[in-house]
Amino acid sequence: MSVDLNSTPLFFSELKETILPLSENEKKNSISFLNENKLPTTRNEAWKYTRLAKLGKSKFISSNSELESIDQYNIDPSATTLVFVNGFFSEELSSNDCPDNLTWSLLSQKNKIEETISDESEYFNCLNSAFLVEGVELNIADKAIMKNPIQIIHVLNGDAIISNFRIVVNAGKSSEASIITGFFSENGDSQFSNVISEINVAENAKLTMDKLQYETESTFHISTEKVKQARNSVFTINTATLNGGLVRNNVVVDVDGENCNTHMNGAYLLKNKQHVDNHTLVNHNVPNCDSFELYKGVMDDKSTAVFNGKVIVHKDAQKINAFQSNGNVLISDDATVNSKPELEIFADDVKCSHGSTTGQLDDEAIFYLQCRGLSKKSAHQLMVSAFIGEVLEKFENENVRTYINGLLKSRFNWDYVS
Amino acid sequence: MSKYTEDELAKDLEVQEYKYGFTTDIESDQAPIGLNEDIIRFISAKKEEPKWLLDIRLEAFEVWKGMVEPEWAHVQYTKPDFQAIRYYSAPKQSKKFESWDDVDEEMKITMKKLGISLEEQKRLTGTNVAVDFVMDSVSVGTSFKAKLKELGIIFCSFSEAVQDHPELVREHMGTVVPTKDNFYAALNSAVFTDGSFCYIPKGVRCPMELSTYFRINEGGTGQFERTLVIADKGSYVSYLEGCTAPQRDENQLHAAVVELIAKDDAEIKYSTVQNWYPGDKNGVGGIFNFVTKRGICGTNAKISWTQVETGSAVTWKYPSCILKGDNSIGEFFSVAVTNNFQQADTGTKMIHLGKNTKSTIISKGISAGKSHNSYRGLVQIHKNATNSRNFSQCDSLLMTDECGAHTYPYIECKNSSSKIEHEATTSKIGEDQIFYCLQRGISEEKAIGLIVNGYCKEVLNQLPMEFAVEAQKLLSISLEGSVG
Amino acid sequence: MIKINDLHAKIGEKEILKGLSLEVKAGEIHAIMGPNGAGKSTLASILAGREDYEVTAGQVDFQGEDLLELSTEDRAREGLFLAFQYPVEIPGVSNINFLRTAINEIREYNKEEPVSAKDFMAMVREKSALVELDSKLASRSVNEGFSGGEKKRNEIFQMAMLAPKLAILDETDSGLDIDALRIVANGVNKLRTSENATIVITHYQRLLDHIVPDFVHVLYDGKIVKTGGKELALELEEKGYDWIKAELAN
């Protein structure tokens, strides 16, 4: 079976089916799904506020490419670094040594890739499966306490490049680790990262993921982190979206064990015509767990932000505390925000809340700062820093914070050091 | 220690009989069952309607045929068979009533059972409520007409308005809820039989509450009433709506359309206590309440919706405000209680178009039994709605571990000078609060009543006195003392 | 008034009271002191009827009735009042409505007529003055938005309104400044008669400067280990609880 190209050429018409050792089932299902379905439209509730027409009209190619260096993308120099260019592994740019308690392998080198746990009726999931070029599996040993983070740097290089890329993380029992993912692009227009991460957090493990997005304004980026948590585990994902044309992040957490903590934080700063859409879903399948979510964004120019956070407390999942908060500041009359925090509760002994605010910087406070001698611009910056800083502080890794500050400085010429 | 827990309260509520579940034996004038163009012509002819209205109906019917039932709400039910419904069933009567003495004896008994007894009406005479009573889609009597007439206020049934004030009806009908708006609005536009009409002239403050009481009586009928309230510039009116239906093991359809027009500087307060038959404790029977309610505000105008929803098997209802005029205000206060197998998907839309527009949403959902209770709301701030404000608070209280409470707010903002705040909470009724009450000698049942009543207070406070009392009873709550 | 005999109780698997005995007669004030975790608040909760605890042995006689067989609300109606360490907020329910409901339910239980609105309001005015509680607080929602001191004064105000036979003050002094402490204590003293009794549970001696007890008991490890007059409280203040622990060890 192959992708039917007889109909109107599609954005993926130029691509070759994956040669990675995926299960026949997964390959077959994803290809038939792509044949039978069109790109989701805004009539689809999950894509209500994000139009994909432009993506559908583009044409992408998949090709390997080389980079001189990744110095400018080296978020945390202390980390064990794995570099992927256009989705392909770059051995020379990656770290040579690997800590004892970590084993990693490229998906292309495996005999067999486990079937994706992601939703196979989801378009981009199927696209990823059908055209997967490479991926990496990280196995963190049981009881491993990793001193330094593991860093995956993904760079798009060249015109109209698409990368269908996958990350698999298995955090062993009672392990403690942090992973940084960085997404960048250069030398080209109309690129597309389509990434799936599957993350399994075993009993008593603690895993933190810091995700930085800094692709260009002509880039499409769609990524899904699908997380499963076993009992007594703590999972944190911090996302900073500082550039990118059309960005869609899906974080789906299944809390399958009791006494888990889940933290999701996101900061997005948008300008020009950027469109950033954060979708999160926490499934509380079992009792006695807590989840916390904080997403904040500042939108300038003609940018649009979307936030859709959903918490589902399933039947009999009692004693759940779930808190969700979304804050937005519009600093241009052409900017838009659509926020949709949702709660679906099927148990009674729970405490769940969400809050969403949309507004502007406090004029009184800006005036006050001006009276103390600050320029209007720096007063603005200070207020934005304070607003977004609440999220940036959630990045516990100081190197990551410093790197983010650098990006903010170069993109917005604003200094966010709080 | 006594074991009266919320489960038991929930159980008591379960077995509590629906006290409005009687039928009235009044001869009625009916259309054949089913829906086609002839039925629509039949309804229109029965009501001696002008051609323009028949045209509206036929056009709506054409549109409706091409539409599908909405499925996005968090409710599950067997879709009504639209060909098995009787679309016209009028109590047989020859004349319209100017005074309650003219009312048919059977009808008086019906009203008495509903709590709108003649005595009460007499007592209320000269105080503050004028009632229009709509039974099975037809308005059977409007009181206080003469008194209102002195002020130029028109308060009558929709069909009377079509006969006596066709220009007002024609100008405004369908301007807020267009025929094509949604599946049920289109159906209503095609087959509506009656409803209430109200016009408050410029600068007039209506001195009494205007009230419509809706009643579905016949089996196998649907109720499709239409309400149009026009508050001309600088006027004020408070409008009440109540509803009941007999206990039947079939699902009856109620698909109403309510349009409110508040012109510049006018204010409309619209309160509903919805107590349609909710079905029995096994989820058999009950009303499907699919209602489209919307108002539009001119400059400096205000529309305030208050609703206490305790009835219906399935509710699908979003009283909304289009804040078109600058400085206009929209409010939505709601208590929705669901029990047994009831399902409610309710909320509001606040569409901010004008500058300096303000909206407030307070929603309290209480779920018991195996019911599902959803808040669904939209706050939309358009590009030109500078300095607009919205505040929303949506709270859900859960009484059992088999029910569900869901919150789906949509917040869309395209203006950088506007401010939107939305908060929602979901929690169980507080065990420590119950214990505190018990320790002061208050029984568990009363404690839960007190706590639930307190929980809904912000909304109940919005209701006119007459309705607040009924609403509190409906929430199975002992009265908050008038002391203090 | 109340006679507690060899009371054992546990929460989950943890035994907290391990054979507590205590008798309080009408007209008396008893203070129960003890280190954190000794079981002081547990005792108050069990007497009031909180269901989290399981009584495994022992009896409690309250005015000739088996207290443990009564429901929480019937204990209250029989005249047992607990001033909560952490008074609960009940949004939307006015203090006045709350108290009127309570009083009328208690009266109904005693086969008395409900209190008239006029008499009730007169009583509110009189009793709120007793604890220097702004009468405006009486019409606010129960404890909602009250400061710590206001909450505690509200507890004593409710006690004055309900006129219990036996009042148990659970750490009523915690979080109070000296003025609030004086007001609360004055209220309690004014309510004292030869017909009623009070159990004051506290960690510190300072409340007992204002409410002078007839007996002071030391609760330690689920039992009353020492009983004395008011001077025992001073001794405890001076020497701390280690002294008792040491004495017990010997």
Image: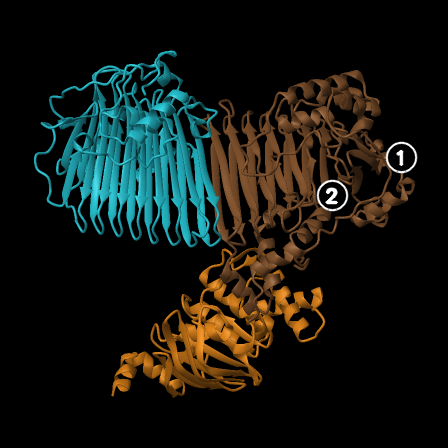
Chain colours: A cyan, B brown, C orange
Q: Which mark is residue B245?
A: 2
Q: Nearer the viewer, residue A345 or A308?
A: A345
**SS of the residue under disc 2:** loop
Quadrant location of the C terminus of chain B in the rendered image:
bottom right
Q: Which mark is residue B132?
A: none
Residue drawn at 41 percent across, 69 percent down: C178
Quadrant location of the N terminus of chain B in the rendered image:
bottom right
Left or right: B286 in relation to C42: right
Residue drawn at 34 percent across, 13 percent down: A5
Residue C206 % position (x, y): 39, 75
Left or right: B95 in relation to C154: right
Q: Type of residue at label 2?
A: Ala
Q: Is residue A287 above or below residue B86?
A: below
Identify the image quadrant of residue C86. Answer: bottom left
Q: Is residue C151 above or below residue B59?
A: below
Tell me if I can see residue C139 in this picture.
no
Chain of the residue under the numbered disc 1 shown in the image? B
Q: Type of residue at label 1?
A: Gln
Report the residue marked by disc 1. B93
Q: N-terminal of the two: label 2 or label 1?
A: 1
**SS of the residue under disc 1:** loop
Residue B480 % position (x, y): 65, 57
Identify the image quadrant of residue A159. Answer: top left
Would you call the spot at circle 1 few (<14 residues within 10 Å), some (14-19), or many (20 or more)?
few
- The alpha-carbon separation of the residues under discs 2 and 1 comes to 20 Å
Residue A6 % position (x, y): 36, 11
